[in-house]
């Protein structure tokens, strides 16, 4: 059973009340936090790039976001990243995470200066169908982020009813630390072992609605049961005084440099802003990734294709050359094996 989110729109200007509710539930749902027009502009640019990449159905208006199921792909496949890379580099996308209405809300919650993480996540989720399901399973962000405590702000690029794949939260799960996980086929490549029955809450999202949540809360997406691309972005925020892991000051998956990102921007104010703020950058704690990778190597050696996405991530992103070579070898074996 899915409960409705507790709506925090009415206390959005009360920092103490927001902080107390965030501590209690692990999330805040705020309607209209981002201006609809600002989100719509990012959505327009995403859809234009999706159309250019052949992701949208021919003969349909681009704004309708109707996906071409024959072109369904997912992160971290090269076919996906080719279209996604220019989306992630958009100045308008990065500027949206700095919107004063969001940063101001975190300033009220923290009662202190805010650091907006340079790294952000954006998703393009094709509709679920036979043979393709990239629904994000239950997971915690903490293992991907490291550093000090941080909080995500997730918003869909467009209206997102539950049947389109909106995000849901396991209320109160943020107080239990990092939980046991396994590999999964959805976005992020991991899911928690526990099912959190009876704890899930969610809502339909209108464009501009946001859910803010702690990096240890269990959360997941509902399946995209429409014919449209479900597009979203989430940025992360923390106190400036807390350390930030080096992975969170990098670009997504290291697929480009910041100089490449900034080269196409019209304004300079957000270029390397975290350096000017004096952010304290610390090494990324890889203990959870090492555990994930060990699972992938074991599954890959057994010919289990569930390991494939994690092996791709190792090849694309891991700093250890030996691990990258091992992952390439297992990928080649998986791809050469006949389909089951």
Image: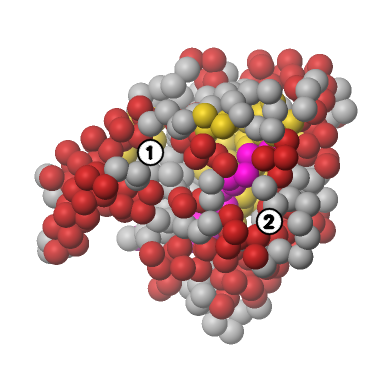
Q: In the picture, which quadrant includes the C terminus?
A: bottom left
Q: Residue at x 40, y 73 (%)?
A: 70
Q: Mark 1 points at which residue?
A: 190
Q: Which residue is drawn at 38% across and 64% down?
A: 78
- Asked where in the image residue 152 lies, by quadrant, the reply is top right
Residue depth check, mark 1 versus mark 2: number of the one nearer the observer: 2
Q: Which colour scheme is used?
A: secondary structure
Q: As displayed, is residue 328 above or below residue 336? A: above
32, 202: nearer the viewer: 32
Q: Which of marks 1 and 2 is nearer the N terminus?
A: 2
- Asked where in the image residue 139 lies, by quadrant, the reply is top left
Q: Position of residue 316 (x, y in %)?
A: 36, 53
Taking the image as drawn, is residue 304 in sight? no
Classify residue 42 as left or right of residue 233: right
Give the structural element (helix, strand or loop) at label 2.
helix
Local crowd at mark 2 within 10 Å, few (<14), some, or many (≥20)?
many
Per the rendered image, the range of residues in magenta is 116-130
Q: As displayed, is residue 132 above or below residue 304? A: below
Q: Which residue is drawn at 83% across and 42% down?
A: 100
265, 80: nearer the viewer: 265
Give the dominant element type of the magenta stretch: helix, strand or loop: strand
Q: As displayed, is residue 329 above or below residue 118? A: below
Q: Which residue is drawn at 19% across and 48% down?
A: 326
Residue 93 marker: 2
229, 33: nearer the viewer: 33
Taking the image as drawn, is residue 172 in sight? yes
Q: Is 128 in the magenta?
A: yes
Q: Is 37 in the magenta?
A: no
């Amino acid at each position: 059973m899915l409960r409705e989110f507790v709506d925090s729109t009415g206390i959005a200007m009360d920092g103490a009340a927001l902080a107390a509710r965030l501590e209690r539930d692990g999330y805040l749902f705020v309607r209209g936090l981002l201006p609809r027009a600002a989100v719509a502009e990012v959505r327009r640019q995403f859809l234009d790039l999706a159309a250019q990449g052949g992701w949208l159905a021919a003969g349909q208006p681009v704004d309708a976001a109707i996906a071409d199921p024959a072109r369904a792909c997912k992160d971290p496949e090269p076919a996906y990243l080719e279209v996604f890379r220019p989306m992630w580099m958009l100045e308008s996308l990065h500027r949206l995470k700095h919107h004063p209405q969001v940063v101001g809300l975190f300033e009220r919650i923290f009662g202190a200066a805010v650091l907006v993480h340079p790294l952000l996540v954006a998703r393009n989720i094709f509709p679920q169908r036979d043979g393709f399901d990239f629904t994000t399973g239950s997971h915690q962000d903490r293992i991907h982020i490291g550093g000090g405590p941080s909080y995500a702000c997730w918003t869909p690029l467009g209206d997102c009813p539950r049947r389109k794949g909106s995000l849901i939260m396991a209320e109160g799960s943020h107080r239990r630390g990092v939980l046991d996980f396994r590999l999964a086929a959805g976005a992020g490549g991991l899911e928690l072992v526990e099912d959190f029955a009876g704890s899930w809450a969610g809502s339909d999202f209108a464009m501009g609605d946001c859910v803010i949540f702690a990096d240890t809360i269990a959360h997941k997406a509902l399946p995209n049961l429409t014919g449209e691309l479900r597009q979203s972005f989430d940025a992360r925020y923390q106190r400036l005084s807390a350390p930030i892991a080096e992975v969170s000051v990098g670009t997504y998956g290291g697929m480009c440099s910041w100089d490449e990102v900034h080269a196409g921007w019209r304004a300079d104010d957000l270029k390397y802003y975290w350096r000017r703020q004096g952010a304290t950058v610390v090494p990324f704690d890889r203990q959870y990734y090492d555990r994930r990778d060990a699972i992938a190597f074991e599954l890959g050696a057994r010919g289990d294709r569930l390991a494939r996405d994690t092996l791709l991530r190792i090849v694309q992103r891991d700093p250890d050359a030996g691990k990258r070579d091992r992952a390439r070898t297992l990928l080649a074996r998986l791809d050469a094996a006949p389909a089951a």
